[in-house]
Image: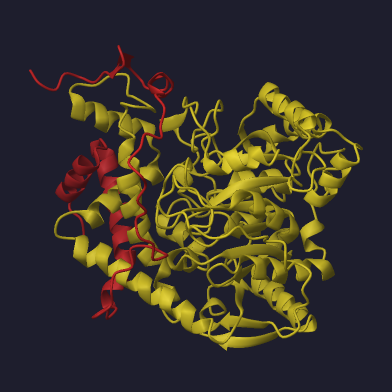
Chain colours: A yellow, B red
Amino acid sequence: MINASLSELSAALAAKTISAVELATLFLDRIDRLNPGLNAFIALDREQTLAQARAADASGKVGAGDTPLAGIPLAHKDIFCTKGWRTSCGSRMLENFVSPYDAHVVEKLAAAGMVTLGKLNMDEFAMGSSNETSYFGPVKNPWDTSRVPGGSSGGSAAAIAARLAPAATGTDTGGSIRQPAALCGLTGLKPTYGAVSRYGMIAFASSLDQAGPMAKSAEDCALLLNAMAGFDERDSTSLERPAEDYARDLEKPLQGLRIGLPGEFFGEGMDADVRAAVDAALDQYRKLGATTVEVSLPNSGLSVPAYYVIAPAEASSNLSRFDGVRYGYRAPEYGDLNDMYSKSRAQGFGAEVKRRILIGTYVLSHGYYDAYYLKAQKIRRLIAADFQKAFESCDVIMGPTSPSVAFAFGAKSADPVQMYLSDIYTISTNLAGLPGMSLPCGFGNGGMPVGLQIIGNWFGEAKMLNVAHQYQQVTDWHTRMPQLAGAAQ
Amino acid sequence: MSLTPEDVSRIALLSRIELSAAERETTREQLNGILGFIEQLQAIDTAGIEPMAHAVDVVQRLRPDVVTETDRRADFQAVAPETEAGLYLVPKVIE
């Protein structure tokens, strides 16, 4: 049951082979046993979970055609406000924040009948690529617990890889769904900007943040995205578009598919083991009838520096709301009002979050705004234009998700810039607002998973999922699971 | 360009983040590392390029001017550090 796809779980629930309560209990027991070694979950509440499962069993949604996910458990990245649950965003600042409302995504998945198993660890305020910035301690990669799971949705990735949850929500501002999916051997999708509502998703960089599904396969991601996406008037950048079935094209053959390979993604910087796995995946695609064409994204090398102007700028503005007045941490001792703000923020935020607020404040400050912030926004347009030019000659773009497999704890924490460069292949997609996904395509050094990245044009989710699903029909990388100590089922 | 200790203090003040003297020096080194990294943007010719503030071109939606929210003050203040009689308490601002 722990390896079952969402469709299989749906069928088992419909056939009454298992109930939602039994299924939730199975995963909760597994979490109790294995989570202490992984630190993926940072909030659990068996009573609430089982109450939701009982409600699902009694709802009539299980087995109904329009709610295929009813009764299936999932877990939420702790960036999503979840009513009645502690929602910390991985920060001491929100250590005691119990959300008074649900994020749109949480609301939608609950309405679909899904059952919340708990809240998942993450880099503090989603700022990090290794999960080492969480106030609640790092998440361990289930494939090798001396290595990072990636970030910022590292708890989501580790929980699914270890089969502590069949699926999870994630968010991706610069690669935070795709990079941990790659490092933990999962399938994850960042939708087109605006496809999924940001309401109730704690803001990091609002022009880049986007929520998406993380699961074992493209088919599972399609079913989850069907339930997550949709217009929400409470998000001012939510797109008003007719609902679509993201699973509609899964079975289409790939004959004639044109895959664009950007030279910039295949140059130096990519480890040899990653390259070998990605090259083998491309060969597989050629066997499936696709052709590969060379494309160029000449400005993509500028995406990391441009991102580290734009994202901190937006973060410094967004995180100004944490002032120790309306919610969140307040320092125990302070003098005047400014001292209260400064001490509460100094004690409530961790080092990486503070660094980004400081950088963001600087690039927005008088005298530097044009030189840094406007300059980066102009380069953002160049990066986005490169993609549109590339899509004139291809249907999807492929490359590695991450330049290396999962690295050891501490390997990149001393130098912030080195850590930032681990998102070198994913960040340009966020700047352009395009959808992107990662799927497992083999194993590299140390037996660690390698991720293949697919980038689509705006609203190309169904196409990307089709391309990923067809690959998963002829390969079994996505079905592999790590051997965990004490995991005997 | 490189930040001086005074620059770091000014940015920290604007950010409302207290830094100890020791933190200030480490922070200065790290911020200079990051600024050195983003300096490469300056070499790019962006004459005539419109800044891109958002990933998709959307215009602000308007809605009818009607009440859509219910009063949830008690719920929202339950998560505040200090409140009294429906008000948020902060240190005295006006003597």
Q: Is residue A102 above or below residue A249?
A: above
**So how many labels did they put on this image?**
0
**Rendered residue at 61%/76% (across/down):** A396
Residue A81 x %, y %: 51, 36
Q: Nearer the viewer, residue A443 or A385?
A: A385
Answer with left or right where residue A397 lies relative to residue A193.
right
Q: Position of residue A278 (x, y in %)?
A: 68, 74
Q: Quadrant of the C terminus of chain A?
A: top right
Residue A139 appears anywhere in the view: no
Q: Is residue A463 left or right of residue A30?
A: left
Name the foreground residue: A242 vs A214: A242
Occupied quadrant, residue A351 = top left
Q: Is residue A208 visible?
A: yes
Quarter placement of the N terminus of chain A: top right
Query: Where A161 falls versus A76 (above or below)?
Result: below
Is A356 in front, or is A51? A51
Residue at horizontal 78%, vertical 62%?
A477
**Residue ranking furthest to the top:** B85
* Residue at the spot 68% in from the left edge and 43% down from the top edge: A159
- Percent position (x, y) of residue A235? 44, 48
